[in-house]
Amino acid sequence: EVQLVESGGGLVQAGGSLRLSCAVSGFTFDDYAIGWFRQAPGKEREGVSCIGSIDGSTSYADSVKGRFTISSDNAKNTVYLQMNSLRPEDTGVYYCAADSRGPRCRDTSLIRRDRKFFGAWGQGTQVTVSS
């Protein structure tokens, strides 16, 4: 069974840090890029970051560049999202998903029209940043 499980969310003050984890099982980790997405109450889900499973290429939304870092541990089949300098607007449910097109993180992976290529969504982990 294909499964992606997020963890690591919580409540943190503005300026603080959290590290999210996305544990992957049920498919070969090298076969698909992994993306992180978030959804705030009343807002659309948005792409945050993605990472290529073989070349480690990365992409970030403008709103998180310089603050968030995506990484992967292929031996543990896990993708991480290190989030620093958190802001209240980072609050939301964070999800990870696999890109069905293959192992490459594309320039367009985080935009809305590419969302349909991502599947095996996890249940999400709540991140709340207080001001």
Image (spheres, rainbow, N blue to C red):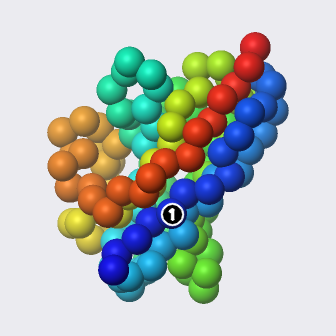
Instruction: Report the front residue among 86 and 10.
Output: 10
- Pick the residue in front: 85 or 45: 45
| Image side of residue 89 versus residue 24, left or right | right
Residue 8 can be seen in this image: yes
Q: Nearer the viewer, residue 88 or 113?
A: 88
The part of the image, by quadrant, that contains residue 28 is bottom left
Residue 50 visible? The answer is no
Which residue shows up at 24% across the image and 45% down it? 115
Image label count: 1
Reply above or below: 62 against 80: above
Quarter the C terminus occupies: top right
Q: Is 125 on the left-hand or right-hand side of 130?
A: left
Image vertical order of residue 53 relative to residue 93, above or below:
below
44 on left or right of 90: left
Q: Badge 1 local density, few (<14 within 10 Å), some, or many (20+)?
A: some
Res. 3 image quadrant = bottom left
* Residue 68 position in % (x across, y down): 63, 42
Which SS class for mark 1? Answer: strand
* Residue drawn 61% across the image and 81% down it: 76
Q: Residue at x 25, y 36 (%)?
A: 112
Q: Residue at the far top: name it.
A: 131
Q: Which residue is mark 1?
A: 5
Residue 36 location (% of width, % of height):
46, 49
Q: Is residue 128 above or below residue 33?
A: above
Quarter the N terminus occupies: bottom left
Q: Amino acid at mark 1?
A: Val
Horizontal and vertical percent position of residue 33: 38, 66
Q: Position of residue 56 (x, y in %)?
A: 50, 68
